[in-house]
């Protein structure tokens, strides 16, 4: 009985921890992070970075994303991923992050055709958008 309680506690903590990684559906999120979500990888205040530049919490949240599953489990394969830091106009502060995922459709005639999808995060690494293609 004690082990069941411990397992239940671990699952509860894990679900609370992962819930804080996605704030995209909270009221006001879209409005609050509008400037972040207007940025693209071509914006002048956006810089490509590696995962080593991220906090552990941001890395954990970003690692929870499975873009192939979100697009349609079994129908898409993730083939690339690039993380970008979105800075304010003076490059003094990170406003958020952007990950651009490349994915292929498994049943497409052209197996080399890659579609790209953006997912935005706030400065804490919490997801503030669903995927968007372009």
Image: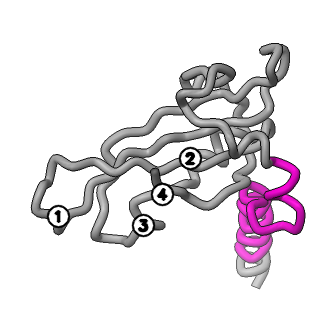
Q: Real-space Cα distance between discs 4 and 2?
A: 8 Å
Picture coordinates of residue 66, whole percent (x, y): 48, 57
Going from N to C along the chain, the mark reached first, 3 or 1, is 3
Residue depicted at x 82% and y 14%: 90
Q: Real-space Cα distance between discs 3 and 1?
A: 14 Å
Q: Is residue 10 left or right of residue 40?
A: right
Label 2, secondary structure: give it: helix
Image marks 3 and 1: residues in contact by CB distance under 8 Å: no
Choose top left, top right, bottom left or bottom right for residue 19. bottom right
Q: Of 103 and 45, which appears nearest the observer? A: 45
Q: Is residue 44 left or right of residue 9?
A: left
Q: Which mark is residue 66?
A: 4
Q: Which mark is residue 108?
A: 1
Image marks 4 and 2: residues in contact by CB distance under 8 Å: no
Label 1, secondary structure: give it: loop
Going from N to C along the chain, the mark reached first, 2 or 1, is 2
Going from N to C along the chain, the mark reached first, 3 or 2, is 2
Looking at the image, is mark 1 or mark 4 nearer the viewer? 1
Residue at the spot of label 2:
63
Quarter of the image where the N terminus is located: bottom right
């Amino acid at each position: 009985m004690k082990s069941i309680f411990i397992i239940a506690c671990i699952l509860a903590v894990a679900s609370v921890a992962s819930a804080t990684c996605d704030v995209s559906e909270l009221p006001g999120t879209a409005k609050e992070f509008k400037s972040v979500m207007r940025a693209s990888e071509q914006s002048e205040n956006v810089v490509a970075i590696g995962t080593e530049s991220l906090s552990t919490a941001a890395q954990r949240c970003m690692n929870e994303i499975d873009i192939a599953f979100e697009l349609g489990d079994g129908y898409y394969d993730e083939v690339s991923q690039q993380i970008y830091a979105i800075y304010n106009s003076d490059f003094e502060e990170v406003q958020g992050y952007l990950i651009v995922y490349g994915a292929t459709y498994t049943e497409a005639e052209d197996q080399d055709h890659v579609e790209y999808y953006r997912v935005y995060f706030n400065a804490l690494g919490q997801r503030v958008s669903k995927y968007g293609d372009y």
